[in-house]
Amino acid sequence: MKLSLVIPARNEAGNISETLGVLRRRLSDAAIDYEILVVDDGSTDKTADEVGAHSREDACVRLLTNDGRHGFGYAVRCGLDHFAGDAVIIMMADGSDDPEDVVSYYHVLKDKAECAFGSRWMAGARVQAYPRFKFVVNRLSNLLIRVLFGIKYNDVTNAFKGYRRDVVEGCRPLLSPHFNLTVELPLKAIVRGFTYEVIPISWTGRELGESSLRLQEMGSRYLFIVLNVWLEKLLTRGDYERHRDDVFRPLV
């Protein structure tokens, strides 16, 4: 199974080289066939130069430039339009996601489920330097989602997730231009009947730079997407679900 990684990056020159270096080493050690797509989302620093240095060392690292409208969702959607693997993992450029969890996701996607979801809030997970206010908002948002959709999964809002190619295609069209894509993709996958497995993951707060996420700006956008998918679940009577005779098969 070939694995693609999509990493949106905006002004991440201080983080992206370390993120790519650690990721490349871990994937090579695990003998995983991979490609890494870094999507430059309008950076004004040397992010592209840092990625270019890795590309010259490793042809599996590619730089994509998001020439359209900028925003986290637009950048991820650019990567999802261009990845070549059998499955794709979306991860952050700032080093907050653990490459060891990427390997765990790979094995879930290959052998166990069509989606690999992580939780930072279950037994076995490790979280460092998570901002207190962000934690409160996160827990309340995920509680609302769990109640609306009747699911037990408690970390829907985390961007770090993996999907088989057919899941990405089955969740189109994607609407979210910003961080609300982090809830659109998993909720559509769940509502449309794709299988998923949840594993504990690690998360570490960034040391350099500043996150692009602005909680005050994102509330209404998250709510729009959550309600949009909830209405699909409530009103479409399964019209968008995949055929029930589809059988899960491991990828080789």
Image (cartoon, rainbow, N blue to C red):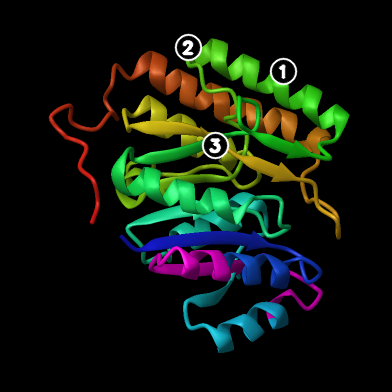
**Who is closer to the viewer here, 228 or 30?**
30
Front-lying residue, 151 or 148: 151
Q: Residue at x 39, y 33 (%)?
A: 196
Dot 1 lies on which element? Answer: helix
Q: Which residue lies furthest to the left in this view?
A: 245
Relative side of 85 to 225, left or right: left
| The residue stretch that appears in magenta | 24-48
Q: Residue 140 carries which label?
A: 1
Instruction: For the N terminus, give its image quadrant.
Output: bottom left
- 181 with respect to 4 (left or right): right
- Element marked by disc 3: strand
Distance between the Cα atoms at labels 2 and 3? 18 Å
- Determine the image quadrant of residue 122: top right
Residue type at mark 2 is Gly
Q: Which mark, residue 150?
A: 2
- Compared to residue 235, the image places residue 195 above or below, namely below
Q: Mark 3 points at which residue?
A: 118
| Residues tagged 2 and 3 counted as in contact (Cβ below 8 A) | no
